[in-house]
Image (cartoon, rainbow, N blue to C red):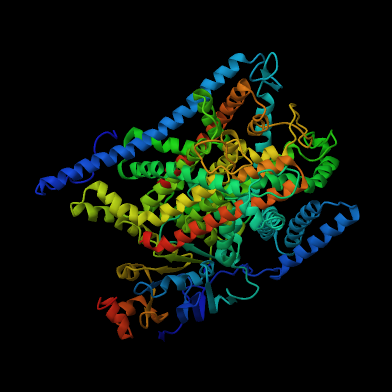
Amino acid sequence: MSQTAVQVPPTPSPPTPPSTLSGRSLPRWAPLGFAAAAIALGCGLGAVAGWHSKTQWGLLSALFFVLISYTVTSTVENKRQAKDRLATSVVWVCFILAVVPLFSLIWVTVSRGLKVLDGYFLTHSMAGVPGFETGGGVYHAIIGTLEQVGLATVISVPIGLLTAIYLVEYGRGALAKAVTFFVDVMTGIPSIVAGLFLLSIMLMFELSPSGLMGALALAILMIPVVVRSTEEMLKLVPNELREASLALGVPKWRTILKVVIPTALGGITTGVMLAVARIAGETAPIMLLVFGSQLINANPFEGAQSSLPFYIWEQYRVGSEASYDRAWAAALVLIAFVMLLNLVARGIARWKAPKTGR
Amino acid sequence: MASTTPTDLPPAPPARPGKSASTGRAGDKIFLGLSRGSGILLLVIMASIAGFLAYRSVIAISQDEGNFLTTFDWNPAGDPPVFGIAVLLFGTVVSSLVAMVIAVPIAVGIALFISHYAPRRLAAPLAYVVDLLAAVPSIIYGIWGALFLVPYLEGLNLWLDEFFAWTYIFDKTEVGVARSLFTVGVLLAIMILPIVTSVSREVFLQVPRMNEEAALALGATRWEVIRMSVLPFGRSGVISASMLGLGRALGETMAVATVLSPSFVISLHLLDPGGGTFAQNIAAKFDEANELGRDALIASGLVLFILTLLVNGAARLIIARRKEYSGANA
Amino acid sequence: MAKRIDVSGLTAYYGAHKAIEDISMTVEPRSVTAFIGPSGCGKSTFLRTLNRMHEVTPGGRVEGKVLLDDEDLYGSDVDPVGVRRTVGMVFQRPNPFPTMSIFDNVAAGLRLNGSYKKNQLTDIVEKSLRSANLWNEVKDRLNKPGSGLSGGQQQRLCIARAIAVEPEVLLMDEPCSALDPISTLAIEDLISELKERFTIVIVTHNMQQAARVSDRTAFFNLAAVGQPGRLVEIDETERIFANPSVQATEDYISGRFG
């Protein structure tokens, strides 16, 4: 490590302007201080004015926080720093504003749901239980949900997979473009519209409500989700893999079945499970097409059934303390089911990710 | 056209034993047929959705003694049957707009928080939680909104009325619980927050690192970096995310049906209880509807369908344009 | 305008990984200093510590001192935003703001740092574009997006953007590696003109380029794979290329390794 002697500067530098590097700055804990002051002010004012709603206290504190950080920074530091600080505090406030209701939702569901959720609740139906009385359970609804969602999955997965394969492996030209476009459009169909569509078919052919009709509506909601996620996964499979297989003389369809699909299987499974989680919570089509029942009906092809989301709606509508308890308990079961699907799906995605990402 | 077999692959070498080559080709044909058939089936489904809804709607509208677009009433069982979507259209659009006005800025804030502000250890779990919340079924948002949010919003409603009554829309003219379009809008905002956030976050994370460094190297503060390179890059993404959220809000059924106390009036006093939306009206009126009543509801569903199609179509257009644009700069 | 940089005992990390270790050197004002060395030896990392861009990378942190004339860039009361305003940077790939016009790109830094009148802004933009030898090519389309230019033009646009705020020092991180030979030549000519006004530090993989444009050259190397990068020697460019005092430098320059 050799260093030669410092050279003589070629020309004397012009007088240097005053340093711009350093300036007055607030300590690092300043935002915490602002937050504490703002909360104290917000709650103090709220208490003095006698507002009973804590929502207002919180909103007022948030407002104070943004104002205090801006004014203090603009007096101590400068306008640009103050704007930067303003943006930072607004972003933090947004985050907190959003997190509070979302966590409250989870908290309320769990705490109120645990009240009546027990083995009896999970294994009994509502047969013979008047809505305003305690007792009864959710068994028939769980059966209904599992069957309807299962049927919808059986219908939509093959269609969704094949459509995605068509789009990625074969699709060129006008048909592929049209399919791509309408998959997008289908993603945006409100669930109640899918329900109305099958309702109009039911009216036309004088069919009666059954789990199958609900499952068909759910399938309409599920297909585009499956297509989209499968498409993404198939696109991630490197072309070299396909070419390697084709170069061995393997026909294209076997290449797809034996090389492409297995490579993308983890991601496809994740997509399907997320789609299942989405449709498991749909209420509107069930309401229109399955009609709801208090009894256990294990046959999805005939007669009315219930389902978890529909059960929640039904119990909510009864409007008694006992039925609210049941609604929350069913909500907890449903949330647990959906979250479990999500967690497992994401677990698979993470577990499979390094392999497909190669 | 798609009818030709793909040409990007070399044909199987002719030297292969004839038998297996021909099964390969037959297999290819069957497989292509199946997968193309699924694609076509999808188009058929879409077409029949439009077709069936339109057919039932025509039946309903032809028996409607009122004007379907302007009548402020929903009484298909009456004599003569009278029903119109004016109130529903108004309520749907207004509640969704309230939701957008609240949700989009907050969602952009959270997306920025996750992509640019949160400590790195916090960012990944946060993104995960937001994605999980997008999966919470709407009926659960609905009962939470009705049994929990409504009482909590009463104070806010009174307060808005007290200080902002001069804006007209926040003038509360009727006493009563907060089962208003405004409350519905707040609940819808909470519901679409996760989806708008996660799409925006994706876009913000895609901003090329070098664009941000360009701003940093000019001596920009973090906010200035975001204003100069992140927001311009992400603008169209945020717009399309908002449109997707809007699409959801327009078609949301259960959350509105649980929270709103419906009435067939149009009022811009957003805090007053009352109003209605397409999906809520279907959920509320379906049980006691007769045959014409059902067709009438289907007709209102068709309008909702068209409305969401327009919104989603616009979102897709914006995304497509963005693709071209970002491709040019890649 | 141009200031001297004095680095002493500088070590930079990415998380737990030490990228460069104990580097000390002096960069003379109004001269071009080139950093050469094999890939991964920490030249770019070192360059990015000179305007505190290194700490923008997740996990990036720095120990040691960087004096700009007599002020430590890493002093406790120093604002990194001010440092980057004073020490400009040009990147490996041209990165004009894609949503801004050519004019707005050049004016971007000025607009951050204060309010200018429209005609002042126009003057500075023109002057900067002239200094970057780009004025004649773009004067008729200042309102067109900067991303419509060729790669070499975009890079000169980025140089114009960097010099518009009149920095003391201009850092260039392999500014020609994404360009064709003709654009490279244009940038090299530009560098020799700009050194009349700025202190320039350039990282390059191309030894001919280092020999052509620089007054002094610093050679960086890794002690071994997985070890942090070090400064092997810094000297007059002529001496480095003709008669370096360390054997490793000669080996690298004559192509015996690296």
Q: Nearer the viewer, residue C60 or A167?
A: A167
Badge count: 0
- Residue under the image location 55 percent in, 79 percent down: C65
Figure quadrant of the C terminus of chain A? bottom left
Residue A117: quarter of image: bottom right
Reply above or below: C14 against C191.
Answer: below
Find residue C200 and report its horizontal and vertical position in percent. 45, 68
Q: Nearer the viewer, residue C237 or B49?
A: B49
Instruction: State left or right for residue C68 relative to residue A65.
Output: left
Residue C116 in view here: no
Find residue C28 and report its horizontal and vertical position in percent. 47, 75
Find residue A319 and report its horizontal and vertical position in percent. 75, 42
Figure quadrant of the N terminus of chain A? bottom left
Q: Nearer the viewer, residue C178 or B40?
A: B40
Q: Nearer the viewer, residue A122 or B123?
A: A122
- Residue under the image location 56 percent in, 21 percent down: B57
- Residue under the image location 42 percent in, 45 percent down: A157
Residue C118: quarter of image: top right
Find the residue positioned furthest to the front: A128
Residue B139 in view here: yes
Find residue B200 and report its horizontal and vertical position in percent. 55, 49
Instruction: State left or right for residue A103 relative to residue A145.
Output: right
Find the residue positioned furthest to the left: B15
- Residue under the image location 61 percent in, 25 percent down: B294
Reply above or below: B159 against A351.
Answer: above
